Image (cartoon, rainbow, N blue to C red):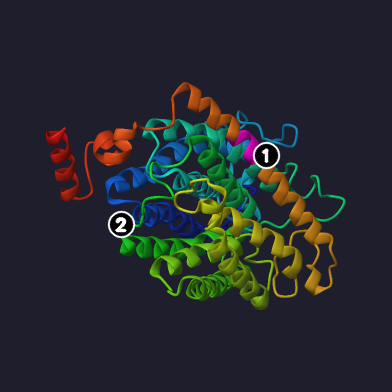
Amino acid sequence: MVLATDAFALDSGNTAWMLMSASLVLLMTPGLAFFYGGMVRGKSVLNMMMMSFGAIGLVGLIWVIYGYSATFSGDIGGIIGNPFELFGLAGLTDDDSLMVSTGVPALVAVGYQATFAIITVALISGAIADRVKFGTWMVFAGVWVTLVYIPVAHMVWGGGLLGADGITSALSTPIDFAGGTVVHINAGVAGLALALVIGKRKGFGSEPMRPHNLPFVMLGAALLWFGWFGFNAGSEFGADGVSGRAWLNTLVATGVAMLAWLVTEKFRDGHATSLGAASGVVAGLVAITPAAAAVDTFGAIAIGLVAGVLCALAVGLKYRFGYDDSLDVVGVHLVGGIVGTVLIGFFATDQNSAWYPEGAVNGLFYGGGLTQLGTQVIVALAAVVFSLVVTLVIAYVLKVTMGWRVSEEVEVSGIDLAVHGETAYENIAQGSVIKEVRA
């Protein structure tokens, strides 16, 4: 049903779908808390989960004050929008909605985009598990979303340098349907930068640091997969055939990536594990995100296959190169995001989708030559460089001002009790008391 107002026609069906999609994407962050929480040791599970929940509160506040405005209002040098144009959402009208053509109110658009900013910040926390101050993390979250996420989102989606009229305009329009560049490459690079600046956990490479609760990991992966349908299918901004294509590609690519990860694990390690299944699910979700509506079924299968294999192999790079990416943010999100973004250059096709950005061309395997591939590579590299440089600066400033690391004693005994005054499991609290008595 469509209800007409002065210059805006409300589509109640699309609006209901987008409210549901926003709720699904918000659910992803608590899902991520379970996923990450299960992967750490029991003495720091609450701290790990709090990093995700803290991101919800802080980033949600920043987004409505100036984040949405700085991303989607005006343009300053192609890098950022005007944070004061819609400051506090004052002056926002439905005619300003990102979804105006689909009949979705502006406030729904604000809410939907807020959930993307929240999950992107939360993703980074997995790279620095078990060893950082909660207060420094919260300051970082606010500064990073302001100086990195918002500019990258503006550059890609808000009319900036990585959009249709940006640095690749002489080639073609970049394709990032739901956030391969803005969310996953961005968060993956930031995780790498923090891991390099903060340093390794005590015992990294010499002590076993196994996940303490694999059912939590599986639950988290399931919640992420469920919420991701709002992430990808919702990015069409309407309930139509394009959202159906994105939904189906998300299902297929993710399932294939999980299978590919398990087969890779079986050949490499002799076992197909539950942790591998959960990680394969996330790798597939990451890789199909930018391509969800731009490829056909065979493209989705290929992207899932490549992502499952490469991400399974990439998680071992931290041991070879000596950086402590605790929960494989680099191996899954950076590598998966690059895989999905670049493979668009091979598999993009407008033959099976009513959605296709003006100025984009088909991929190499669909008669488009190397044009779209070149565009995707340029945008991916630009996002990597921008995010890496700015995140390194933020991380170093916080290192010399607030400090990142908890004390060695706290790291060994557990952050949960020392920082949050509570533990997830009673035996951990008793163990800490016994240590104090013996000391």
Density class for disc 1 (Cα within 10 Å; few <14, some 14-19, many ≥20) is: some
Q: Is residue 386 visible to the viewer in this orientation of the structure?
A: yes
**Where, by quadrant of the figure, is residue 377 drawn?**
bottom right
| Location of residue 117 in the rendering, given as x and y in whole percent from the top left corner | 52, 45
Sequence-wise first label, 2 or 1? 2
Q: Which mark is residue 212?
A: 2
Q: Which mark is residue 18?
A: none
Residue closest to the far top: 401
Q: Report the front residue among 415 and 35.
A: 415
Residue closest to the far right: 170
- The quadrant the C terminus occupies is top left
Residue 28 is inside the magenta segment: no
Q: Name the residue at 82% across, 56% down.
A: 172
Q: Report the front residue among 285 and 405.
A: 405
| Location of residue 392 in the rendering, given as x and y in whole percent from the top left corner | 59, 34
Residue interval drawn in magenta: 387-391
Q: Name the residue at 60% across, 57% down.
A: 335
Q: Which residue is mark 1?
A: 386
Q: Name the residue at 54% across, 35% down.
A: 144
Q: Nearer the viewer, mark 2 or mark 1?
A: 2
| Location of residue 313 in the rendering, given as x and y in whole percent from the top left corner | 56, 63
Is 410 situated left or right of 426 in this image?
A: right
- The quadrant the N terminus occupies is bottom right
Magenta stretch: dominant secondary structure: helix
Is 23 situated left or right of 351 in this image?
A: left
Q: Is residue 173 visible to the viewer in this orientation of the structure?
A: no
Q: Name the residue at 33% across, 63% down.
A: 214
Identify the secondary structure beneath mark 2: loop
| Location of residue 125 in the rendering, given as x and y in whole percent from the top left corner | 45, 44
Identify the secondary structure beneath mark 1: helix
Please give the count of numbered marks on the rendered protein: 2
